[in-house]
Amino acid sequence: MKTDITMRFAGLFSYINTNTCCVDLGGNVVLRIGSLGSPNGRIYFTDNANPPNDIRIPAGITVTDVTRNRPVAPVFLHNNPFGDFIINYPTNYEITFNNQVVVRLINQEQSTVEIANNLDHFVE
């Protein structure tokens, strides 16, 4: 999926460390990308609270495996009944919110994270 919003470099996500890449989507929704141990990771969502609370996958979110051109289905793990998207190396992904690409994961054993110019990000 293409977007009219210009993407910019926002840092790196690694499948081999414990850093979590966070993107504030607005409206008290934070998209988080974390490692489950190489080569697996997960995409999940929280609010802006400190500490953050897990929330359900927001309506309008889709994750696409762009390497294989197929959607990624959410899973509901026992420790997060709100839903996760499981990702893995070496697949590339696009995350859309209300039909706009907001995040791209471009893999190199660690992912370059691109986000829409109008969004903020942070790493925990």
Image (cartoon, rainbow, N blue to C red):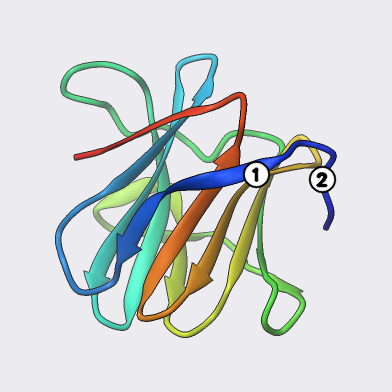
* Amino acid type, residue under disc 2 in the picture: Thr
Answer yes or no: is residue 61 visible.
no
Side of 21 relative to 79 (left or right): right
Please provide percent x and percent y for residue 63: 63, 58
In this rendering, the answer to whether 5 lies above or below 14 is: above
Which is more foreground, mark 2 or mark 1? Answer: 1
Report crowding for label 1: few under 14, some 14 to 19, many 20 or more residues within 10 A (C-alpha).
some
Q: Is residue 58 visible?
A: yes
Q: Nearer the viewer, residue 77 or 53?
A: 53
Q: Is residue 2 left or right of residue 50?
A: right
* Residue drawn at (54%, 14%) of the image: 27
Question: Would you place residue 114 above or below residue 41 in this image?
Answer: above
Q: Quadrant of residue 66?
A: bottom right
Q: Residue at x 45, y 62 (%)?
A: 112
Q: Are marks 2 and 1 in contact (CB under 8 Å)?
A: yes
Question: Where does the image place residue 123, in percent across and percent down from the top left?
Answer: 25, 40
> Dividing the image into 4 quarters, which one contains the N terminus?
bottom right
Q: Which residue position holds label 2?
A: 3
Q: Nearer the viewer, residue 69 or 111?
A: 111
